[in-house]
Amino acid sequence: MQKMDNINLQITATKVRKGIIEAVHSAGSGHPGGSLSAADMFTYLYFEEMNIDPADPRKEDRDRFVLSKGHNSPGLYSVLANRGYFPVEDLKTFRKLGSYLQGHPCMNETPGVDMSSGSLGQGISTAVGMALSGKISGKDYRVYTLLGDGEIQEGQVWEASMFAGARNLDNLVVIVDNNGLQIDGKVEDVCSVYPIDKKFEAFNFEVININGHDFDEIRAAFAKARETKGKPTAIIMKTTKGKDVSFMEDKAEWHGKAPNDEQYAVAIEELDKKIADLEAEG
């Protein structure tokens, strides 16, 4: 696939954010805040970084992605739809009875989903297992997993990290969405996870701190991860919860709440304006 410049990546990421709002509003429930904060990362992974093929979602040599913070399924679904795995219109069926777009991703139902998500902390363990399997079987695919900063309060995260570092899984990239907020408020107030980078360094990770909304920094981080040998990589990305929807930005209340009709209209108008401005700039 032809590489995209930053303007087109930003346009695509904004379309992904529109899909998130469409899905959560249509369902009347869901988790927009963390989905919006990770939209740029979702976009880069699926449009630039990963070896994938929407026409063959299960191809053997594909790169794998595990959404460890599975409640952010609107973000994953929106990028999969925009990448061509299924129609964007289907995002409006999110969480509806009979829909294949369930509240948590299901690998048996949704094209492009490599692992079903369950309790927080479990996804990284699965990703570590996938990476180990690749090493044992001599495959060259890479494995990516996205965690929330609140999620890494789970002890299982550090058990998996310890194992990944001990086994030198350099085909694994762990991404932490550090938007600073979880359902009960600020992460540092609920149960501080800081310093995140030093914790991963202690488990033999190559650690890269970035602005998770800057595509130049995202691109450089993944290039460094590919060059790193003998240890897994952790990308700690500083983000804004609710990014690009003015009334949702940096507010914990939008962790798991759907916009009403009036709020939906405001959000879509803001995102449409950003797309128009970016297209004019490009």
Image: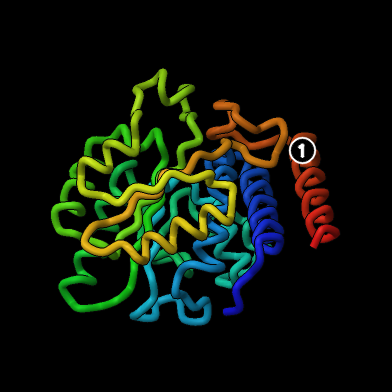
Residue 260 image offset from top left, x and y in percent: 72, 35
Q: Name which quarter of the figure residue 129 lies in.
A: bottom left
Residue 13 image offset from top left, x and y in percent: 64, 56
Name the foreground residue: 195 vs 250. Answer: 195
Horizontal arrangement in the rendering, residue 23 relative to residue 57 (left or right): right
Residue at x-position 82% and y-position 58%: 281
Is residue 100 among what the camera can see? Answer: no
List the residue tagged with mark 1: 261
Residue 41 image offset from top left, x and y in percent: 52, 54
Q: Is residue 247 above or below residue 7?
A: above
Q: Is residue 195 above or below residue 30?
A: above
Is residue 201 among what the camera can see? Answer: yes
Q: Name which quarter of the figure residue 194 lies in.
A: top left
Q: Regarding mark 1 in the picture, which secondary structure is present there? A: helix
Label 1 Cα crowd, 10 Å radius (few <14 / some 14-19 / many 20+): few
Name the image quarter holding the C terminus: bottom right
Residue at x-position 53% and y-position 44%: 211
Name the foreground residue: 71 vs 271. Answer: 271
Residue 257 image offset from top left, x and y in percent: 59, 33
Q: How is the image coloured?
A: rainbow
Horizontal arrangement in the rendering, residue 247 relative to residue 99 (left or right): right
Name the image quarter holding the N terminus: bottom right
**Residue situated furthest top in the rendering:** 189
Q: Is residue 161 above or below residue 114?
A: above
Tell me which amino acid carries mark 1: Asp
